[in-house]
Amino acid sequence: MGSGASGMFETCMVAILVAALCALIREAGGEGIYICADVSQESETKRIIDETMQAYGRIDVLVNNAGIVLGGTVDTTTLADYQRTMDVNVKSVLMLSLLVIP
């Protein structure tokens, strides 16, 4: 997602689309919830698991599907961009997996 006003717009659009998808799933007899979270933050990963457990009582499958690409080259990528990419693409996988694996 972007940053600033553009990022807020993108986040709102995603929320609207996913809420509509969850409604379609429920209309078809299935179940679905939408949890908006920053997976790079440990407290947010815990909230994801807590809300999922509250809704379903268990987690049978974990799909770590978050990822970002911040364009740039070796000489134009900042350490902050690198860290953000690693936090979302790598650290979040470990944090969520550790919370779910018995």
Image: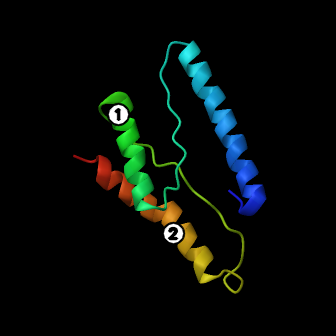
Disc on the earlier residue, 1 or 2: 1
Badge 2 crowding class, 10 Å Cα cut-off, few under 14, some 14 to 19, many 20 or more, is: some
Q: Position of residue 51 (x, y in %)?
A: 40, 39
- Vertical relation: 92 (above or below) 84: above
- Reading the image, the residue beneath label 1 is 54
Label 1 element class:
helix
In this view of the protein, which residue sits in the foreground, 55 or 100? 55
Taking 6 as reference, is 62 above or below it? above
Give residue 94's position: percent from left, percent from top: 37, 59
Q: In screen coordinates, is 100 left or right of 2? A: left
Between 94 and 32, the one lying in front of the other is 32
Residue found at x 68% / y 48%: 11
Give the left or right position of residue 91, taking residue 89 as reference. Answer: left
Quarter holding residue 58:
top left
Q: Amino acid at mark 2?
A: Met
Q: Which residue is depicted at the point 51% across and 69% down? A: 86
Identify the amino acid type marked 1.
Gln
Residue at the spot x=46%, y=61% of the render? Answer: 41
Quadrant placement of the N terminus: bottom right
CA–CA distance in space, label 1 to label 2: 29 Å
Residue tagged 2 = 86
Give whichever of 27, 90 is nearer the camera. 27
Q: Is residue 71 left or right of residue 54?
A: right
Disc marking residue 98: none
Q: Secondary structure at mark 2?
A: helix
- Number of the front mark, 1 or 2: 1
x and y percentages locating residue 13 in the rendered image:
72, 42
